[in-house]
C-alpha cells in the first residue's frame, strides 16, 4: 500500500492506494477528517471504435450510510443520482476531460463513492483529487494530474475547503481546478464581489493546487504504471491533397456572416457535395473526407475571427441585439421573454407557500429550500426532431448555474416569506442559453413583484487562441464559437459585482492576464445588457399578480402552538377549511397564512394574534360567552384568554338567572376589571354601563 498526505491550513488530505479495489485500472482512497471517498477508474481494453466523441463517464454517488442515515422513500436504497450528485460529477468531469490525449477513444468510467461523511469536510472537491490520482497512477493515457479546491472568504481571509458552517457567512463559494501550471476550471457563487477579488481567490487557490498536484506526482513515482500507447490515426496525405484540389478555397465563403440556419445549412450542403465526389474512388474514407472538410472550415473561421470577423459579423466585444417582453403569459405570477440574437428564454416565476419548499434528502440531512430554478432545453429549440424522455445532466448544470447567479438578489425569507420557483423554457438556442436564463429569470421575478435587491445579468465569453501573443476574447459567444473556441467563460452579476462564475477550457490552461481581460470585457457586456433590461423594467412591480397567493406572518407563543393546532390537527384543519387558507407554523411560533382572499386572511391573522395578546385591566374587549354557571358566565376574549363574568357584574340591577341575560356563543363587550394573584381574569358589563353614565 502507498500513501501520501498534505496539510492545507488546518485540514489534512490523505491519498492511499493498493488496499481496496485492486482489479481496477486505478483506485485511490481519499480522506480528509472523517470524510472518506473511494475513487476508481476503468477503461476498456484493446482497440475501440471511434464514436466521434470521447466516451468518458463520471459517476459520483453519496452513500447514505456514510453519514449514518437510511435513505427516505419506499425502497430505502440509493436509486438514480440526485441533482447534487449530478452537479458533483460535472465538477470532476470538466477538469478531467480536456487532458485526455487526442486519439484515445476507449470508454472510460470514473466512479466516486462517498463512504464516510463527517459534515465538515465536503466530498465534492476531494472526488476530483481522487479521480486525478487514480488516473495518474493507472495505465490510462492522461495528461494530468489536476486538483480542485473550494475557496471561501471570512473577514477578508481566504479559506480553503471551507466547512458548511463557514460557508454560511462567507461572501463567496468557489471551486477552482488546475494543473501545476495553470487553472483549467472555475465554478462559483459570490455576493457581488469585484473582478479583482475573484482573480485573487483563483490565484490563492492555484497556489494550493500546485501542492496537491505535487503529492500526486510523488505517488505516481512510487506506484504508477506505464501508460498505454495511443495510436493516432495515420494521416492520409494523398487523400487530403485530393480533397484540397477539389475544395480549393471555395469553402471560405461559407464563413461569411449569416444566421445559424443559413450557416449550418450551407455547410451541410457543401460537405455533402464534396463527399459525393469521393464515393466511387474512396468509399471507405467518406468519414475522413467529411471530417477533413469540416476541420478546414473551422480552421478558416478561427483565423477570420482572430483577424476581426466573427461568424455573424459582430466585433469581438459586441453583444447581439436584445429584445425583451414581460407579462407575456396572462395567468402566471410573473413572466418574461428574453431574446438575444438567436437565443431565447421564456421564463416564468411562480410564488407559493412554505409547504411548497423543496425537500432535499442527502447525506448532510433533510433540508428545505425556499427558492429553485429549473432549466429546460427541449430538442425543438435547436430545430431537432427527436423525443425528450428525461432530464439531462446539462439541464441540471445550466439550471444550477443560473440559480446561483440569482440567489443573492432574492429578498430574505423573513421579509418576503414566499417559496419562489423560476422555470426557464429555452425556445431558441445559439449559444449562452444559461445566461439568457439569468436575464429572463430576473425579469420574471420583477414582473411578479418580488422585491429583488438589484437586477443581475449574465454573459458568456469565448476565446480563440493561437498563442500567448495572438488571441481574441469574444463577448456573447455563438454556439459555433463555443464549439470551435478554446474557452467558455460565463459571468453573471450586477454592474458593481459578480454573483456567479463558470469557466471551462479546451486548452491546457489560461494565463491570468487573459482571464483578467476576459472578466473586464464581461463586465462591459454585462452592463450593456443591464441597460437594455432597465429600458423594459427598471424596478419590480409594486403589487403581486392577482393570481398569486397572499401571505401574512403572525407569531403565537410557543406554549400555545399545541392548543392552536388541536388534537390530531383538529383546530388548524377547521380554520383552514372555514377560511380557505393554508397555515404553516414553525417550532418557534412563526406562522404563515397563505390564501387568495385578503379579508379571510386578515380574519385568521386577527384570530391567531389573540394567542399573543396580553390582557390589560381597564380595557374593553369583544368577548364570546363560552359557558354559563349559576354564579356567572365564562367569557373568552382571545384563544387561551378566558375569565369570569360574575352574575353581580351583568347589570346595575339584580339579575336572578344568568340565562336571562346571556346565552352560550353570544358576542358581548366586557371590561377587564382585575387580574388576581392567581392570574385569573375578572370581567364586568356593569362597569361599562357605569363608565357610560359618568361620561
Image (spheres, helix red, strand yellow):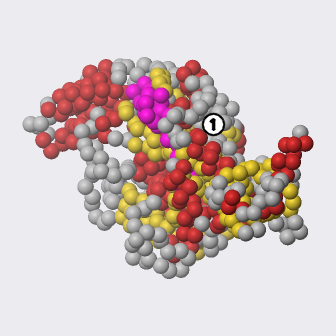
Bin the neighbour count of mark 1 within 10 Å (Cα to Cα): few under 14, some 14-19, many 20 and up.
Answer: many
224 within the magenta span: no
| Residue depicted at 76% across the width and 68% down the height | 631
Percent x, y for residue 29? 53, 72
| Residue nearer the viewer, 595 or 344 | 595
Residue nearer the viewer, 666 or 157: 666
Q: Which of the 4 image quarters holds residue 560? A: bottom right
How many numbered markers are drawn? 1
Residue 330 at what x, y percent from top left?
43, 30
Residue 520 percent coordinates (x, y): 63, 30
Asked if residue 330 is among those painted magenta in the image, a careful observer would answer yes
Q: Is residue 23 above or below residue 417?
A: below
In this picture, which residue range is highlighted in magenta? 327-355
In the rendered image, the quadrant that contains the C terminus is: top right
Q: Nearer the viewer, residue 163 or 329?
A: 329
Q: Vertically, is 202 above or below 464?
A: below
x%, y% of residue 678? 85, 70
- Residue 585, visible in the rendered structure: yes
Q: Relative to 692, is 117 above or below?
A: below
Residue beneath the point at 50% across and 54% down: 577
Q: Residue at x 38, y 41 (%)?
A: 377
Q: Is residue 608 visible?
A: no
Q: Extreme left residue here? A: 280
The residue at 26%/21% (across/down) is: 250
Vertical arrangement, residue 276 with respect to residue 321, above or below = below
- Quadrant hosting residue 673: bottom right
The local secondary structure at tag 1 comes to loop
Q: Residue tagged by mark 1?
A: 452
Q: Nearer the viewer, residue 51 or 328?
A: 328
Amino acid at each position: 500500500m502507498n500513501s501520501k498526505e498534505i496539510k492545507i491550513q488546518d485540514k489534512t488530505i490523505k491519498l492511499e492506494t493498493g488496499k481496496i479495489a485492486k482489479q481496477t485500472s486505478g483506485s485511490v482512497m481519499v480522506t480528509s477528517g472523517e470524510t472518506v471517498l473511494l475513487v476508481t477508474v476503468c477503461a476498456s481494453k484493446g482497440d475501440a471504435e471511434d464514436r466521434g466523441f470521447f466516451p468518458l463517464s463520471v459517476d459520483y454517488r453519496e452513500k447514505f450510510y456514510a453519514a449514518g442515515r437510511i435513505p427516505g422513500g419506499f425502497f430505502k436504497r440509493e436509486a438514480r443520482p440526485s441533482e447534487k450528485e449530478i452537479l458533483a460529477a460535472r465538477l470532476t468531469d470538466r477538469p478531467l476531460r480536456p487532458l485526455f490525449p487526442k486519439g484515445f477513444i476507449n470508454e472510460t468510467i470514473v466512479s466516486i463513492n462517498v463512504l464516510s461523511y463527517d459534515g465538515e469536510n465536503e466530498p465534492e472537491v476531494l472526488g476530483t483529487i481522487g479521480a486525478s490520482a487514480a488516473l495518474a497512477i493507472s495505465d490510462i493515457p492522461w495528461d494530468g494530474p489536476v486538483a480542485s479546491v473550494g475557496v471561501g472568504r471570512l473577514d477578508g481571509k481566504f479559506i480553503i475547503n471551507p466547512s458548511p458552517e463557514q460557508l454560511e457567512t462567507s461572501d463567496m463559494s468557489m471551486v477552482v481546478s488546475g494543473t501545476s501550471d495553470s487553472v483549467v476550471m472555475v465554478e462559483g457563487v459570490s455576493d457581488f464581489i469585484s473582478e479583482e477579488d475573484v482573480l485573487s481567490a483563483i490565484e490563492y487557490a492555484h497556489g494550493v493546487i500546485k501542492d496537491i498536484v505535487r503529492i500526486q506526482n510523488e505517488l505516481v513515482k512510487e506506484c504508477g504504471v506505464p501508460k498505454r500507447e495511443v495510436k493516432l490515426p495515420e494521416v492520409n496525405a494523398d487523400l487530403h491533397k485530393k480533397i484540397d484540389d477539389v475544395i480549393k478555397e471555395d469553402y471560405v465563403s461559407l464563413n461569411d456572416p449569416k444566421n445559424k440556419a443559413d450557416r449550418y445549412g450551407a455547410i451541410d450542403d457543401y460537405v455533402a457535395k464534396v463527399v459525393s465526389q469521393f464515393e466511387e474512388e474512396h468509399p471507405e474514407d467518406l468519414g475522413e473526407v467529411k471530417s477533413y472538410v469540416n476541420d478546414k472550415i473551422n480552421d478558416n473561421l478561427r483565423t477570420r475571427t482572430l483577424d476581426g470577423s466573427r461568424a455573424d459579423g459582430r466585433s469581438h466585444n459586441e453583444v447581439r441585439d436584445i429584445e425583451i417582453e414581460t407579462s407575456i403569459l396572462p395567468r402566471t405570477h410573473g413572466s418574461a421573454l428574453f431574446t438575444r440574437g438567436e437565443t431565447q428564454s421564456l421564463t416564468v416565476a411562480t410564488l407559493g407557500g412554505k409547504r411548497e419548499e423543496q425537500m432535499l434528502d442527502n447525506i448532510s440531512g433533510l433540508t428545505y429550500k425556499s427558492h429553485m430554478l429549473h432549466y429546460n432545453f427541449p430538442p425543438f429549440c435547436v430545430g431537432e426532431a427527436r423525443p425528450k424522455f428525461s432530464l439531462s445532466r446539462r439541464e441540471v448544470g445550466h439550471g444550477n448555474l443560473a440559480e446561483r447567479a440569482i440567489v443573492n438578489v432574492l429578498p430574505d425569507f423573513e421579509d418576503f416569506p414566499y417559496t419562489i420557483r423560476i422555470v426557464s423554457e429555452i425556445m431558441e438556442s445559439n449559444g449562452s442559453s444559461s445566461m439568457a436564463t439569468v436575464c429572463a429569470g430576473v425579469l420574471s421575478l420583477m414582473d411578479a413583484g418580488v422585491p429583488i435587491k438589484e437586477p443581475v445579468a449574465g454573459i458568456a465569453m469565448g476565446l480563440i487562441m493561437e498563442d500567448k501573443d495572438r488571441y481574441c476574447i469574444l463577448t456573447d459567444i455563438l454556439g459555433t464559437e463555443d464549439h470551435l473556441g478554446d474557452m467558455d467563460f460565463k459571468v453573471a452579476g450586477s454592474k458593481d459585482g459578480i454573483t456567479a462564475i463558470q469557466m471551462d477550457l479546451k486548452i491546457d490552461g489560461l494565463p491570468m492576464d487573459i482571464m483578467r481581460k476576459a472578466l473586464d470585457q464581461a463586465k462591459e457586456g454585462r452592463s450593456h445588457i443591464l441597460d437594455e433590461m432597465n429600458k423594459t423594467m427598471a424596478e419590480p412591480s409594486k403589487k403581486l399578480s392577482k393570481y398569486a397567493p397572499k401571505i401574512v406572518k403572525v407569531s403565537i407563543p410557543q406554549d400555545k402552538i399545541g392548543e392552536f393546532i388541536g388534537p390530531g390537527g383538529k383546530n388548524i384543519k377547521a380554520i383552514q377549511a372555514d377560511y380557505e387558507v393554508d397555515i404553516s407554523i414553525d417550532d418557534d411560533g412563526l406562522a404563515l397564512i397563505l390564501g387568495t382572499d385578503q379579508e379571510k386572511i386578515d380574519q385568521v391573522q386577527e384570530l391567531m394574534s389573540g394567542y399573543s395578546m396580553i390582557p390589560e385591566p381597564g380595557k374593553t374587549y369583544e368577548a364570546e360567552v363560552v359557558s354559563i354557571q349559576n354564579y356567572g358566565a365564562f367569557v373568552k376574549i382571545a384563544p387561551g384568554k378566558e375569565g369570569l363574568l360574575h352574575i353581580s357584574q351583568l347589570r346595575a340591577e339584580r339579575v336572578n338567572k344568568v340565562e336571562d341575560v346571556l346565552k352560550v356563543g353570544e358576542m358581548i363587550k366586557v371590561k377587564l376589571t382585575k387580574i388576581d394573584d392567581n392570574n385569573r381574569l375578572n370581567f364586568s358589563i356593569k362597569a361599562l354601563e357605569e363608565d357610560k353614565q359618568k361620561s
